[in-house]
Image: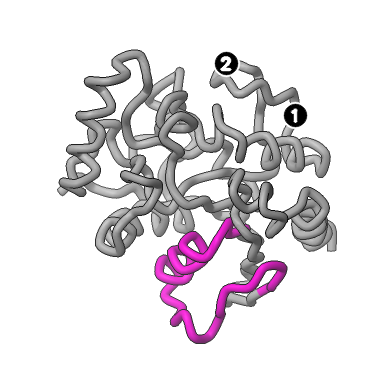
Amino acid sequence: MRKLRTSADPVDQPISALHGRLADEPERDCPLCPRLVAFRAANRAAHADWYNGAVPGFGPRSAPVLIVGLAPGLAGANRTGRPFTGDYAGVLLYETLLAAGFAVGSYAARIDDGLRLTRCRIVNAVRCVPPGNKPLPKEIATCNRFLAVEFAAMPALKAVLALGRIAHEAVLRARGVPPRKAPFQHGAEHRLGNNLILFDSYHVSRYNTSTGRLTAAMFSEVVARLAAVLEA
């Protein structure tokens, strides 16, 4: 098995200039989940010009905040190769991060739009796009090793923002925290030990925003509280 790098190693040097994949992230053609591998192959046959691979994280590992999403969107991150880029969810996420001072530049739904994260890093609980945007429990568990690496490789980490229940539970698994000790609830804050705080939000999906389950104001409020923790 390929060695996973620890926080003692240099971690902010991408081995792919275009997509910024770091050496301890899953390879673009990650073979670990057969169902996701087969879905990737089908997508490559249908859309040869798409990224169609395990999507690397976005943002510096020197950042104090880690944002964890569910999985790449089929025509979003799976197409562009950058988390939350190319579909509706990215509009709310990145506009909120820009307004709160976690990013600079502008979001134009392209990997070359010049957007740069400054005080946060974004990864998904599952790095490859799943059929129907619904990863299986086994796939979530298999990919959790890469989320654990992110925690080990971010020495200045103070807070985590989980977008949805699956991301929340993936964070708990990576940190070794039983779910019953930190149940998911929008707007909740959980102390995970080692001065790390987990913030919960509903996912920034089009479904959640179109149904009113999550509004821009609700999401901005969570991000504002997260920013306040960094300033305390």
Whether residue 95 sits left or right of residue 201 in the image: it is right
| Picture residue at 76% right of the left edge, 42% below the top | 96
**In this picture, is 39 found above or below 194?**
above
Say which of marks 2 and 1 sits in front: 2
**In this picture, is 61 found above or below 225?**
above
Label located before the other in sequence (2 or 1): 1
Q: Amino acid at mark 1?
A: Val
Most extreme residue toward the bottom, as rendered?
A: 180
Along the viewing direction, whichever of 52 and 56 lies nearer the viewer: 52
| Picture residue at 42% right of the left edge, 25% below the top | 79
Q: Which mark is residue 39?
A: none
Residue placed under numbered mark 1 in the picture: 104
Q: Secondary structure at mark 1?
A: strand
Q: In x, y percent, where is residue 109?
A: 61, 24
| Picture residue at 57% right of the left edge, 73% below the top | 184
Q: Which residues are magenta?
A: 161-189
Along the viewing direction, whichever of 68 and 37 lies nearer the viewer: 37
Q: Is residue 11 magenta?
A: no
Residue placed under numbered mark 2 in the picture: 112
Quadrant assignment for the C terminus: bottom right
Whether residue 162 sits left or right of residue 47 in the image: it is right
Q: In x, y percent, where is residue 177?
A: 46, 78
Q: Amino acid at mark 2?
A: Asp
The quadrant in which residue 108 appears is top right
Q: Badge 1: few (under 14), some or many (20 or more) residues near its Cα, within 10 Å? A: some
**In this picture, is 4 found above or below 166?**
above
Whether residue 39 sits left or right of residue 178 in the image: it is left
State the CA–CA distance, disc 2 to disc 1. 14 Å
